[in-house]
Amino acid sequence: MTIEEAQRQVDEWIKTYGVRYFSELTNMAILTEEVGEVARIMARSYGDQSTKPGEKTSLADELADVMWVLICIANQTGIDLTEAFARNLEKKTSRDKERHINNPKLK
């Protein structure tokens, strides 16, 4: 699935099952919540914290939740994520093409 297809599928789902998009501010709050759930799983899976009984531990599911809300925000604000990502990758390449290669901390 391409990013464009994902944006289209989310939009179709919202229009079919979701009634309408939540407001942009509500979606920003939901995105923050979902990123927090990713952080919790990372802390328990790769950090020093232990998992609580009954706690969700599916990193894939939580990352997909983050992606879903991010796509919702892009759709409702008219952002083509394929185009935005391509521009961002170009910016990073131009800015950082030698930065990481020459970083002694990464050797």
Image: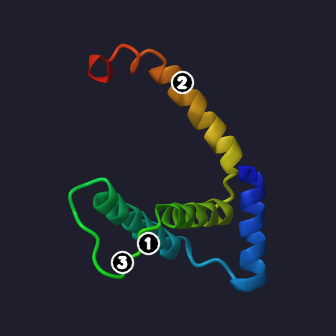
As displayed, is residue 48 above or below residue 102? below
Local packing at callout 1 (Cα closer than 10 Å; few below 14, some 14-19, many 20+) is: few
Q: Residue at x 66, y 54 (%)?
A: 79
Name the element at disc 3: loop
Residue 94: percent from left, percent from top: 53, 21
Q: Amino acid at mark 3?
A: Glu
Disc 3 and disc 2 in contact, CB within 8 angstroms? no
Give the residue displayed 65% in from the left and 36% down from the top. 86
What residue is disc 1 on?
29
User: Which quarter of the rendering shows the C terminus?
Assistant: top left
Left of 64 or right of it: where is 86? right
54 or 25, which lies in front?
A: 54
| Position of residue 61 measured from the top left corner of the image (x, y, whole percent) | 53, 67
Query: Who is closer to the viewer here, 66 or 47?
Result: 47
- Residue kind at label 2, given as amino acid type: Thr
Question: Eyeballing the image, is 20 above or below 60?
Answer: below
- Identify residue for label 3: 55
Mark 2 and mark 1: Cα distance apart in space: 31 Å
